[in-house]
Image: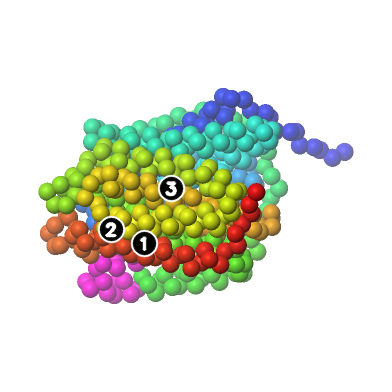
Amino acid sequence: MTATLAPPVRIGRAAVGALGMLAVATGALESVVTPTLPLLQRELDMSPSEGALLSIVLLITGALVTPVAGKLGDRYGGKRILIRLMAVVCAGGLVSALAPNLPVLLLGQVLQGAMVGALPLSFILVRKHLPAGESKVAIGVVSGLFVGGGMAGTLSAGPVAEGLSRHWMFALPTIAVIGSTALVNRLMPHDPPGRSDDAGVDWPGLLLLSGTLVTLMLVLALAPDVASQPLALGALILLLAAFAGGWTAVERRATSPMVDLRMLARPAVWKSCVLTFVICVGTSVAVYLVPQLFAVPSEDYGFGASATAIGFFLLPGAVAASLAGPISGIGARRYGSRAVVTAGIVIMVTALIALAAVHTEVWHLVIGKVMIALANGLCVTALVTGTATSVEQGDTGIATSLVLVTRVLGYAVGAQASGAILTAATPSGSDVPAESAFVTGFAIAAAVTALSLLVTRTMSKGAKE
């Protein structure tokens, strides 16, 4: 007789609620750095380039962890991997909360980046333990609560950091993550492991991609100091070339590559990757420069905004980003994905040009950030959806992972380039960069983003209903 696996245990509202609480807590922990970055730079004596690195290191880790977490979840069970992943996140949150300096805080953020893999694992668990109709509702609830947690973190980080300390701004959401993880462990039944993948995890590809991304960030961070450290920068460029070349060679030969570069030969995929990279470069420039401009002292040319005020100023942009996904989906069904992407690019270019030309009032920056967040959400959602539907079902994960990697690269390059521009334009002995640096950053981002319209003209219109 052959043994049969018992069907997964159906979960109730309490288990879904526990996953929702975990989504709120991780969303809050993920979002505390952005509104308080100027405060962290002052307290830890960071340069703008170092601040840019701090703002993106969590995202880089997440891009590396997410595909590995999915494979391990299929092999050993989603709950088992989720709990272990959240243990790493909790450790990272505690390291960030206790960090006395920038290197330790960077380590904490690297560990916290594991949280990016938690949301897909939550979706896997919901789909295993609920019927199709109910699982869609549960996934929507968990996704919405993650966005809500991000908004809560954006609003609360400033008051907590200023009223208590920067340590508590990491500690409080970490405590919430610990508590919600314990609830998930108690209420969520174990799911049976799936069939093992003989090819396993592409560990060499993962390590080489990690080295490539980290070295790229160091090159961009040192670029403003090329005159004083030419040998160090040259050595890093050679190391970057070695990592990138090694990663390309390994991925092309791997049986089950982390990122299948052969998929880039397909026009729909490489066009989506190019557009995603360029659009995310433009978005990350605004994500980094706008809070910095808010924080510039009012006696210079800025607004002298506190971390609390910056959080409130950034909130409308977070709301716009949360609405962009559904709007993009509706627009793509009605007009096609190319029309949605083109509209998003035009909105973003307009906003970046406007910020470069006019940024003398708070509402200028708030409206500009809202437009950029909306445009980014419209474009990225349409590109990911278009990529997923342009390939065979079995290639969906490979194709979308390429878009994910290019998205991270775009954010990383944009943020580090912005930090480098501010660092280069900061006079010796001063903490305030020249106003022209912000104008330059927004203008360059607008020009680069506008070039992507050349690619959108060659895209297929996409499915319309």
Question: Of helix, strand and loop, which one carries label 1?
Answer: helix
Q: Neighbour class for label 3 at 10 Å: few (<14), some, many (≥20)?
A: many
Tag 2: Cα neighbours inside 10 Å, few (<14), some, or many (≥20)? some
Q: Which residue is mark 1?
A: 446
Tell which of 299 and 425 is nearer to you: 299
Mark drawn on residue 356? 2
Q: Quadrant of the N terminus?
A: top right
Among the 4 quarters of the image, the one containing residue 50: bottom left
Q: Is residue 58 left or right of residue 258?
A: left
Q: Is residue 305 left or right of residue 368?
A: left
Q: Nearer the viewer, residue 32 or 168?
A: 32
Residues at marks 2 and 1 touching, judged by CB atoms closer than 8 Å: yes
Mark 1–mark 3 contact, CB under 8 Å?
A: no
- What's drawn in magenta, residue-wise? 214-235
Q: Which residue is mark 3?
A: 374
Quote the CA–CA distance across marks 2 and 3.
18 Å
Considering the numbered disc 2 on the image, is that residue within a helix, a strand or a loop? helix
Q: Amino acid at mark 2?
A: Ala
Indicate whether residue 130 is drawn in magenta.
no
Q: Residue at x 75, y 33 (%)?
A: 6
